[in-house]
Image: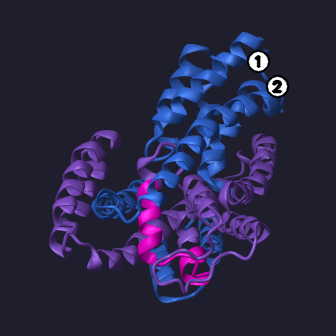
Amino acid sequence: MSALVHPVLSTADLLGLFGHFLVLSLLAIGGAITTAPDMHRYVVAEHHWISDAQFSASIAIAQAAPGPNVLFVAVIGWNVAGPIGTLATMAGTMLPSTALTLIATRWGQRRRDTRFVRAFKTGLTPLTIGLLVATGWLLARPYVDFSAQGAGAIALIAVSIAGMLRTRLSPIWLVALGAVVGAMGWA
Amino acid sequence: MSEPTSDADGARPGPKSTGDLFFTFNRLALQGFGGVLAVAQRELVERQGWLSREEFVEMLALSQVLPGPNVVNLGLMLGDRFFGLRGAFAAVAGMLVVPFVIVMALTLAYAEFSRLAFVSGALRGMGAVAAGLIIATAIRLMTTLGSNRLGVPLAALFAALTFAMIAWLRWPLIWVIAALGTTAVAIAYARTP
C-alpha cells in the first residue's frame, strides 16, 4: 500500500525537483546511475520526501525489470509525488542529455572524416572497453564471496559469459536461468 | 539527415523504417534485464548488422562521454543517423515505453512481493547473470582493439588503466575521462594522418 501514499508537494517543490534533475542530467557522465548519490541527498536527506529504503528499492526494482536502468528515476519520482513526480524527474533527466546528444552526434557526423573526430574515437575506444569491464566487475562484486551461494553466483557468471560468447542463445534465457537458480537459493 | 546506409563500406543494411527502429529497440529493451547494453550489442551488431563492432564501440564511446543514460544516448545516435529526429525519438520511445509500464506495475506490486524469500533470491541470480552479460560484451568488443590506431599494447594499457581507476581506486568517472581520455586522444591525434 505504501507505494500509493505520497507526500503532497507544492508547485514550488515540484519545480525544484524538476530543476534539480535537470541539472543532474548534464552531470550524468557515465549514465544516470552515477548521479544517484546526489539524488539521494536531495530527495531523502534534504527534503525527507522518501525514506532511505524506498530510495534503494527504487533502484533495485528498475534493475530487476527489463529495460534501461534509467527508469529508476521514474520510480523515485513516483514515490515522491505520484504521476506528476514521475513526469518531473523523467523530463528533467531526459531533456538536457537528449538535446546535447543530438547536437553532438550531428556535429560529429558532419566532421567524421576530420583528423580530430577520428582521433577522438580512436582514443576513447580503449577507455570504453575498460569501463565496460569495470561495470561488469562492480555489478558482480556483491554476489561473489566464499560462501556456497558465492560459489553458485560465480558459476552463474561464468555460465553467462560462456553462453554469450559461445552460443547464439538470447540473453533472456540466461537471465531466466539466473532467476531459477537464485529462487532455489543456490546463488 | 536521412542519408541511408552511410557507412564506409556502404553494404551494411539499415533499419527499414522508424517502425522497424521502434520495434527493434522495444525488443532489445524487453530482453535487457539489469541493463540493455549486452542485448543492444547482440541485436544491433550480431543480428541486425546495422552497425559493425567498430561502429558500435565508437558510438558507445561517445554515448559514455556525453551525459545521460548510455543506451538511451546510443539509441538517439543510431536513430538520428538513419532517420533524423524522427528516428532518434522512435528508437528511444521503443526502448522506454513498454519497460516504463512494467517498472511502474512492479513498483505498485513491490510492497507485497518483496517479503518472499524466493523473490529476493531470484533478483540475486538475475543480478549475477546481468554482470556476466556485461563482462561477455566487453570481451567480445576487445577484438576491435586489434585495428585501433594506437596499436594493441597501448590500447590495452589504456583499457587496463581505466578499469583499475574505476573498479579498484573508485575515482570519479569525470576525472578518469578527463585525464586518460585527453592523453589517449592526443596520442591518437599525433598518429592520425
Point 69% across, 35% down: residue: A91
Q: Color used for chain B?
A: purple
Locate residue B159 relative to residue A184 in the image: left or right.
Answer: left
Q: Amino acid at mark 2?
A: Val
Q: Which residue is mark 1?
A: A7
Locate residue B38 relative to residue B80 in the image: left or right.
Answer: left
In the image, residue A51 lies at what x, y percent?
A: 63, 25
Asked whether B47 falls inside the magenta stretch, the response is: yes
In the image, residue B89 lies at what x, y percent?
A: 71, 54
Q: Are marks 2 and 1 on the same chain?
A: yes
Residue nearer the viewer, A3 or A38 = A38
Q: Is residue A158 above or below residue B97?
A: below
Q: Chain of mark 1?
A: A
Point 53% across, 72% down: residue: B41
- Report the span colored magenta: B42-62
Locate residue A42 relative to residue A18 in the image: left or right.
Answer: left
Q: Quadrant of residue A126?
A: bottom left
Q: Amino acid at mark 1?
A: Pro
Q: Quadrant of residue B23?
A: bottom right
Q: Quadrant of residue B158?
A: bottom left
Quadrant location, the N terminus of chain A: top right
Answer whether residue A57 is visible to the viewer in this image: no
Q: Color used for chain A?
A: blue
Distance (Cα) linking label 2 and label 1: 7 Å
Q: Which residue is mark 2?
A: A5
Q: Are the two marked residues, 2 and 1, in contact with CB atoms closer than 8 angstroms?
A: no
